Each structure stands twice: as C-alpha cells, then as structure tokens.
Image (cartoon, grey):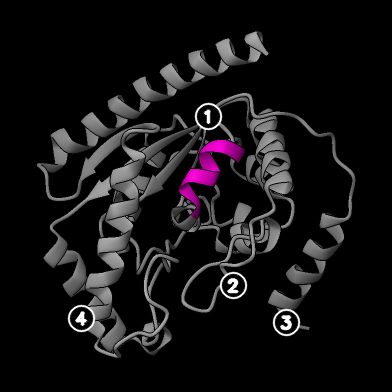
Amino acid sequence: MKTDEVIKRLNVHLANLPFDQAASQAPIVLVVGAPRSGTTVAMQILASSGEYAYPSNIVARFWAMPIYGFALHDALTGGHYQSTGAHRSTIGQTKWPHEPHEFGRFWTEALGFPYGIDGNYQHSPDWDACRQQFGMISQYVAGPVLMKGFHVLPFLEQWLREGPPTVFVRTRRATNDIVESIVRIRERDPRYAKWLGPWMPTMQANLSGDVREEASIQVAHIESALDALEHLALVVHFDLLADAENRDARLVNDVREAVAKATIEGSIDHESA
C-alpha cells in the first residue's frame, strides 16, 4: 500500500473522532493575492519570524483534523515554528518538514471550499466546519495561525461574516509581471496547462483559450475583489519588489501590530456578546 493511501485512510479515521469545540481565540493571518504575486515569499517571511504557528509539511498530512498534525509537529520539532530564511520554493511548494505548506486539501476536503477552474461555485463552503476547525487550532496553538488564503478569494464577503477574526496580508507585484509569470508556468508545466491558482466566479465561464488573456482576466478579478476588501477588513500590504531587508522587517512589524489590534477588537466583541 502506498504512503498516500495510508495517510488518506488515516484522515478518514481522524475526521470521525470527537473533539471539543471552541471559538477562535486569536486572529487568523491569511496571505492573499494573485498567484505569482509574492504570496509564498510573504508566507515564508512571516513563518521565519517565529511569531506564528502555520501548517507545515508535517501538519499538511492531517488535513481532515489539523490539530493532530500540529501536535505531531510540536512533538517532532519541539514546537519549532520558524521556517528557514532562504525563502525557497517551487510554485509554492517547500522542501523541509517544518516549512510552510499551502494546505489545499484542508481547504477543499475539510472545509468544502471549491477551488480552481473545475470547482463547483454553486456549492457553499462548510462554515460550521470552518469555525470548528479554526477554533480547535486556535485553542491548541494558543496564538495566531498563519495560512495562505487562495481558497477564500471567491468568498471574501462570506468569510468576513462567517469566518474567524482575520488579518489579511495582501501581496503586490506589477500586473504585467504577474501575468507573464502565470503564462510561463502554464505553458511549461503540464500540471498547470489548464489553469493555475484560484478561479473567481465573477469571470466568464467560457474562456478564450489564449493563456495570456485568461491570466490577465484572472488577475484583474482577483485584484478587484481585494480592492473591495480594503474597506472591510484589516489589511497589511506586502510589495514583492520592495527592498528586501526593509521589506521583510516592515512586513513582520506591520502584521504584528495588526494582529494585536485584531486581538483587542475580538476581545471587546466577545465581552459585548
């Protein structure tokens, strides 16, 4: 039996185990942006700060019940959440067990978020599962959790109503550079020939077949959704092409301040309720 099949069976079993439910005690930090805009770099910078728990390549094997993955990560690493400062990855994928993972199966299988060009966007995510999972994770790690938020992009308004308290980190890069990077990957890597990254339901269902045009439309719709988010949520900006030394320190500091603000606001809301 192959490793993937064993892990899949384990997740089926874990998903049926009872666990205490709890509300999120600390905000979630979601890194959002168009694919190839710097989301992985931003994630790695924040992960390397040591201030956040995040789904590592260990945690990611427990997508159905991540709390067990976080516990195993802690047992194997001594609770070490500090990614390497090298910021290396291949299309969002990191190499070492303790480094950040995009956690796609958690979003799609445990929480029911449709994703990509083949997703069923008539299907709503499981918001009860979302609150339950993030509540358990937050209670266990006793602090803010850092994740990529590609899957949330088509559901930003609903997330603000139904999801846990969130600080968004919005990544920035010149639109033409993003489009060209998407085009290169889709043309060179058969895995992404059909599509790369999130699909936005606001786009037309019938695509032209021109990779550059499709990428341009995709990026425009993602940026439009994020522009609307600016007025509704706590958003920290990350410019991929800014001076690296000042850029990295500024990101860590800005997110730290936003998390502190979100934590205070969340405590006030909880007491008022």
Question: 10 Å neighbourhood of mark 2: few (<14), some, or many (≥20)?
Answer: few
Judging by the rendered image, the residue that carries numbered circle 2 is 120
Name the mark on residue 27.
1
Q: Nearer the viewer, mark 2 or mark 4?
A: 2
- Identify which amino acid the numbered label 4 is placed on: Arg
Which is more toward the observer, 34 or 239? 34
Judging by the rendered image, the residue that carries numbered circle 4 is 212
Looking at the rendering, which quadrant does residue 239 occupy?
top left
**Real-space Cα separation, disc 3 to disc 4, in angstroms:** 38 Å
First along the sequence among labels 3 and 4 = 3
Disc 3 to disc 1: CB gap under 8 Å:
no
Judging by the rendered image, the residue that carries numbered circle 3 is 2
Residue 160 on the magenta span: yes
Q: List x then y, in percent, for residue 151.
A: 50, 58
- Identify which amino acid the numbered label 2 is placed on: Asn
Magenta residues span 155-163
